[in-house]
Image (spheres, rainbow, N blue to C red):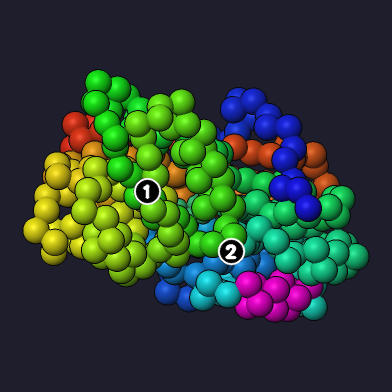
C-alpha cells in the first residue's frame, strides 16, 4: 500500500483560499436535494466529515457549510463521530442517492478501496479534502485538497532545533500524536522526526496518541509528567491536545511556555490565545478554511473540467509576538 502521492503542483496552482465568511455554521448544514445536477445547474455534494474532535474540525465544517450556501451547492453533510465505518456508510448512501460529487476527509489512511471503487463504478467523482488515503486503486478520486503535513512537522521541528541550538542538552521532548493511522499523525510525526534527527541532544523520550482531543492531550500529558521527571518540551500535533497538556502542566505546578515549552499545529483561536499569553511557544498553522476551494473544485469536476491531482493549501507559522499581533483579525 502506498500513500497516493501525486506530483505536488506549484503553489501557484493552489486556489487562494478565500476568507470564508465568519459567523456560526448553519445549524442544519444539510439540505434536501434531488441529486440531479441538471436542475438549474445546481450540483449536489455528499460530504462525509471526520467528526467534531477539535477546534480545527469545527472551523473546517463551518467553512464547508458556509461555502456550499455561497456557491449554491446542495450539500448533504454527514458527521462520522470519528468512526471509519460511519464514513463508509455515508459514502455508500451518497452513491445510492446519486449525488453529483462526493467529498470526504478520511479519518484514517487505509481501508477505503472498496467504497471508493463503488463510487467510481457508479460514475460519481470523489474529492479528498484535508487528509489523504493509502490506495493502489487507480483513479478512485479526482484530487486531494489539503495541507502538506510533513512540512508542518518539519517546521515545528526546525523551531525546536533553533530554540535549543546553544543548549548543552539533553533536551527531553514528549510528543502528543494525532489520531492513530490518520494522515496528519503519520506525516507530522515523520516531518518532526526528520527535522530534529540532526541534533543528538534532542530526544523524544515518549510519544503517544491523544486522538486530537483536548481531554486526550491532558490525560496523556498527566501520565508523561508522572513517568518523566525532566520534560523540556511538548510537541503536540494539534492545538487541542496542546491545550490539554497545558492544563496538565499547570495542575502539576509548572509553568507552560517556560518550565515546559509547547509547540503545536493548527493555529486555532484558543491555541493562538495561549501563544499570545506566553503559555505556548510556537504554532504551525494548518488552514481549515477549505470550503470555497472545495466548492470550486467540485463544480469543475462535475463539469468534466480538468483539476490538479493535488492542491496544497498554504500554511504559515507564528511565534508569541506574531500571535498577539494577528489574533484580533483571525477568522477561526
Ligand atoms: C489537519 C486535520 C487535523 C487537525 C486536527 O488537516 O486533519 O484533524 O490538525 C483535526 O485539529 O482534528
Q: Is residue 170 left or right of residue 253?
A: right
Ligand 1 within 8 Å, label 2 CB: no
* Secondary structure found at label 1: strand
- Tell me if mark 2 has few (under 14), some (14-19) or many (20+) residues whose alpha carbon lies within 10 angstroms of its own: many
Q: Which residue is mark 1?
A: 205
Whether the magenta-drawn stretch holds residue 199 is answered as no
Residue 119 seen anywhere in this rendered image of the structure: no
Q: Nearer the viewer, residue 246 or 45?
A: 246
Number of marks in the rendered image? 2
Residue 63 coordinates in the image, percent (x, y) = 47, 55
Magenta highlight range: 84-95
- Tell me if mark 1 has few (under 14), some (14-19) or many (20+) residues whose alpha carbon lies within 10 angstroms of its own: some
Q: Nearer the viewer, mark 2 or mark 1?
A: 1
> Which quadrant of the view contains residue 107?
bottom right
State which tag comes first along the sequence, 2 or 1. 2
Identity of the residue drawn at 49% across and 38% down: 193
* Secondary structure found at label 2: loop
User: Outermost residue, right direction?
Assistant: 121
User: Outermost residue, left direction?
Assistant: 253
Identity of the residue drawn at 76% across and 76% down: 92
Amino acid at each position: 500500500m502506498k500513500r497516493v502521492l501525486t506530483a505536488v503542483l506549484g503553489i501557484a496552482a493552489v486556489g487562494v483560499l478565500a476568507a470564508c465568511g465568519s459567523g456560526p455554521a448553519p445549524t442544519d448544514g444539510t439540505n434536501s436535494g434531488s441529486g440531479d445536477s441538471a436542475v438549474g445547474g445546481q450540483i449536489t455534494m455528499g460530504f462525509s466529515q471526520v467528526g467534531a474532535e477539535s477546534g480545527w474540525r469545527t472551523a473546517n465544517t463551518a467553512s464547508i457549510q458556509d461555502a456550499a450556501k455561497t456557491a449554491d451547492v446542495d450539500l448533504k453533510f454527514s458527521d462520522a463521530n470519528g468512526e471509519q465505518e460511519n464514513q463508509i456508510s455515508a459514502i455508500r448512501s451518497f452513491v445510492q442517492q446519486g449525488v453529483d460529487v462526493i467529498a470526504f476527509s478520511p479519518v484514517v489512511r487505509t481501508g477505503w478501496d472498496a467504497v471508493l471503487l463503488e463510487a467510481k463504478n457508479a460514475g460519481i467523482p470523489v474529492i479528498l479534502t484535508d487528509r489523504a488515503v493509502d490506495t493502489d486503486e487507480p483513479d478512485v478520486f479526482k484530487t486531494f485538497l489539503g495541507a502538506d503535513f510533513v512540512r508542518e512537522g518539519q517546521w515545528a521541528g526546525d523551531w525546536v532545533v533553533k530554540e535549543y541550538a546553544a543548549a548543552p542538552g539533553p533536551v527531553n521532548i514528549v510528543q502528543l500524536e494525532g489520531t492513530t493511522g490518520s494522515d496528519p499523525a503519520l506525516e507530522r510525526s515523520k516531518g518532526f522526526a526528520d527535522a530534529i534527527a540532526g541534533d543528538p541532544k534532542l530526544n523524544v523520550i515518549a510519544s503517544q496518541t491523544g486522538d486530537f482531543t483536548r481531554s486526550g492531550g491532558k490525560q496523556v500529558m498527566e501520565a508523561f509528567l508522572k513517568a518523566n521527571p525532566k520534560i523540556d518540551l511538548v510537541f503536540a500535533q494539534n492545538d487541542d491536545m496542546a491545550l490539554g497538556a497545558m492544563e496538565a502542566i499547570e495542575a502539576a505546578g509548572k509553568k507552560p511556555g517556560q518550565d515546559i515549552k509547547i509547540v503545536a499545529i493548527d493555529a486555532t483561536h484558543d491555541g493562538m490565545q495561549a501563544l499570545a499569553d506566553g503559555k505556548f511557544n510556537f504554532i504551525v498553522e494548518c488552514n481549515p478554511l477549505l470550503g470555497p476551494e472545495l466548492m470550486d473544485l467540485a463544480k469543475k469536476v462535475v463539469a468534466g473540467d480538468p483539476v490538479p491531482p493535488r492542491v496544497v493549501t498554504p500554511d504559515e507559522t507564528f511565534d508569541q509576538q506574531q500571535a498577539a499581533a494577528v489574533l484580533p483579525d483571525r477568522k477561526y
